[in-house]
Image (cartoon, grey):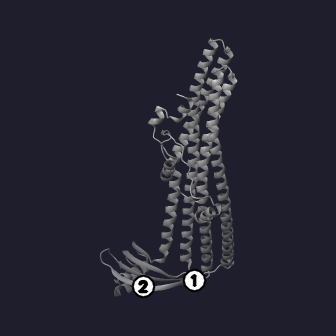
């Protein structure tokens, strides 16, 4: 088996492994990554807080049941009245001053409905909705960052694994070179020094194979962690095809990014949140008006009670003597101005990110094309040098140099491929696009 065939044909162990494409690795990470699940829980909490605040528009009901026993004159007097058990004998001076102890059961159902609060509740709901939007944007941003991290880690696995395969193929080729040199030494056409040089080269390539295997194992464990899989789960990676796609008009992509990017959406949510803060500050100048109703049932024993009811309303209007409401309005106005400026800056930063990501991807694609051509050239040069060595027209250093060039070219090629699909993921993140 030639060195080229050894790289391209999977080993028996690799063939038995489950193939994990990049898109599946990203999908599994988005579905199972613990950090992303935590962000989703935060988003769910923020949505629940919106419902909690919106409940302020609805009536508040309080149900109470109490029991007391004592002989305090006021307590006994009011208890008898509430239970409709007050009699003429209870007006006696001794009965009023020194009443016998009694037990009293008091039950009540109270309802309060806010009729007007100056927009406090509505502004609070808007603020909670803004916080929920921020939590959603944070979750989406974390998902995009996770997809990029998965792609970068997948690239490290692919690079290390391919380097190991290339090193294994180079080991086989180096062993053939050693055997060839030994035959020529036995024939008296080369010296022992050539054999020793090739043997040292063979040992060096074996060491590279061991190091690459270790790097692949570490990178694979890191990818498993991102996927939410067992750290020692085994799998095989493959070179992802180029995403390609229609056009690379960075201006159109930037417009898409402004509409989709989570950090822009977060800035928009911050603007809405600041607007809710201004409305809350203005609402402090207005009174609160509420309607109230209470139905109560009282008695000296649990089963026999008298009922009564009370309805009414309440208006509450308070101000800070230190003009705290006015200071709150100034602070809210400043926060709104800051939010608008931050949003403008975020939109500009998005355009810069998209332009940089497009240019980085174009550069990575160009490097990949050059690297593929370099591999073919290096392998052809190695074939020629070996033929010249067999004919006595090239030295052992030429053979070693050609072998090292092939190994370096293959490593450069895989690194370029990893850079390319990592740059594709970086562009998706810059645009705010999830494949």
State which tag comes first along the sequence, 1 or 2. 1
Task: Return the residue nearer the eye: 126 or 238.
Answer: 238
Q: CA distance from mark 1 to mark 2?
A: 23 Å
SS at circle 2: strand
Vertical relation: 144 (above or below) 215 = below
Question: Is 1 on the left or on the right of 80, as rendered?
Answer: right
**Which label number is shown at residue 287?**
1
Q: Is residue 431 visible?
A: yes
Residue 10 location (% of width, % of height): 49, 35
Task: Return the residue nearer the eye: 96 or 80.
Answer: 80
Furthest toward the bottom, the residue is 88
Mark 1 or 2, closer to the camera: 1
Residue 282 location (% of width, % of height): 62, 79
- Mark 2 crowdedness (10 Å alpha carbons): few <14, some 14-19, many ≥20: few
Furthest toward the left, the residue is 303
The residue pinned by badge 2 equals: 310
- Mark 1 crowdedness (10 Å alpha carbons): few <14, some 14-19, many ≥20: some
């Amino acid at each position: 088996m030639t060195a080229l065939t050894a790289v391209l044909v999977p080993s028996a162990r690799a063939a038995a492994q489950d193939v994990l494409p990049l898109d599946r690795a990203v999908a599994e990470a988005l579905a199972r990554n613990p950090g992303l699940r935590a962000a989703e829980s935060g988003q769910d909490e923020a949505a629940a807080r919106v419902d909690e605040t919106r409940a302020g528009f609805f009536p508040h009901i309080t149900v109470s049941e109490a029991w007391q026993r004592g002989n305090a004159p006021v307590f006994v007097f009011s208890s008898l009245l509430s239970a409709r058990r007050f009699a003429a004998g209870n007006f006696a001076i001794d009965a009023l001053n020194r009443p016998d102890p009694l037990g009293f059961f008091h039950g009540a159902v109270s309802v309060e409905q806010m009729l007007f609060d100056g927009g406090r509740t509505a502004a609070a709901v808007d603020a909670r909705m803004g916080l929920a939007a921020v939590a959603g944007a944070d979750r989406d941003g974390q998902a995009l960052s996770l997809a990029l991290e998965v792609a970068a880690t997948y690239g490290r696995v692919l690079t290390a694994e391919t380097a190991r395969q290339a090193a294994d193929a180079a080991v086989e080729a180096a062993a053939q070179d050693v055997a060839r040199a030994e035959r020529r030494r036995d024939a008296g056409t080369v010296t022992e020094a050539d054999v020793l040089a090739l043997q040292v080269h063979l040992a060096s390539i074996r060491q590279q194979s061991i190091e690459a295997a270790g790097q692949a194992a570490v990178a694979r464990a890191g990818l498993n962690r991102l996927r939410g899989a067992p750290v020692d789960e085994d799998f095989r990676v493959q070179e992802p095809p180029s995403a390609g796609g229609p056009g690379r008009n960075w201006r159109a992509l930037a417009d898409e990014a402004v509409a989709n990017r989570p950090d822009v959406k977060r800035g928009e949510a911050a603007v809405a949140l600041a607007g809710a803060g201004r409305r809350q500050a203005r609402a402090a100048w207005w009174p609160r008006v509420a309607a109230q109703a209470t139905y109560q049932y009282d008695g000296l024993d649990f089963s026999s009670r008298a009922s009564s009811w009370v309805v009414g309303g309440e208006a509450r209007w308070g101000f800070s003597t230190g003009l705290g409401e006015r200071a709150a309005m100034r602070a809210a106005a400043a926060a709104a101005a800051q939010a608008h400026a931050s949003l403008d800056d975020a939109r500009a930063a998005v355009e810069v990110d998209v332009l940089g990501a497009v240019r980085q991807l174009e550069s990575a694609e160009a490097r990949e094309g050059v690297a593929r051509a370099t591999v073919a050239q290096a392998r052809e040069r190695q074939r020629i040098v070996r033929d010249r060595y067999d004919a006595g027209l090239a030295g052992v250093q030429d053979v070693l140099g050609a072998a090292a060039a092939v190994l370096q070219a293959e490593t450069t090629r895989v690194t370029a491929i990893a850079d390319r699909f990592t740059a594709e993921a970086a562009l998706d993140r810059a645009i705010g696009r999830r494949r």
